[in-house]
Amino acid sequence: MSEMVEVPLHAVAHSRAGDKGNRCNLSLIPYDPALYPLLADQVTEARVLELFRHRGATRVTRYDLPSLQSFNFVVDDVLEGGVNGSLNLDGHGKTNSFRLLSLTVRVPAGAVRR
């Protein structure tokens, strides 16, 4: 068995963000589809909510997409009112994908992109 290491998600996955009102959609797609089950165990709704709670997030719903080996997270109340109601410089929440990718996970050392 390969040694397990703790790394930020950006070492093993990528993400994109979108918005709808005061909600942010965040995709999470592992570079290696074989990591999908490990990420499913570790990147939970509770962990993602805690990551965004300081921004006012009240709920996170994770949609598992096993056919695509990816996830979609919907984060409620995180955009400070949304693109039309916020003075936030990132009203669409595009940088939230970078915040998600800062979350740490434990994966086999060989899975980390160099």
Image: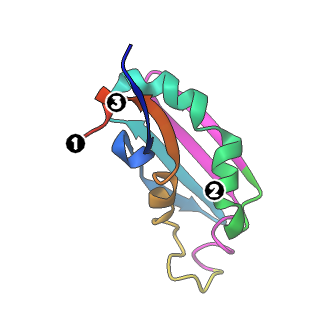
Give the farthest residue toward the front.
3
Tell me the element at label 2.
helix
Residue 104 lies, in percent from the top left, at 51, 45
Q: Amino acid at mark 3?
A: Ala
Q: Which of 42/81 is in front?
A: 42
Q: Residue at x 73, y 67 (%)?
A: 56
- On residue 109, the disc is 3
Q: Which residue was labeled with disc 1?
A: 114
Q: Quadrant of the C terminus?
A: top left
Q: Which residues are magenta?
A: 60-84
Marks 2,3: beta carbons within 8 A: no
Coloring basis for residues:
rainbow
Marks 1,3: beta carbons within 8 A: no
Q: Residue at x 52, y 67 (%)?
A: 93
Q: Which residue was labeled with disc 2?
A: 51
Q: Is residue 66 magenta?
A: yes
Tell me the element at label 3.
helix
Q: Which of 83/80 is in front?
A: 80
Residue 54 lies, in percent from the top left, at 70, 67
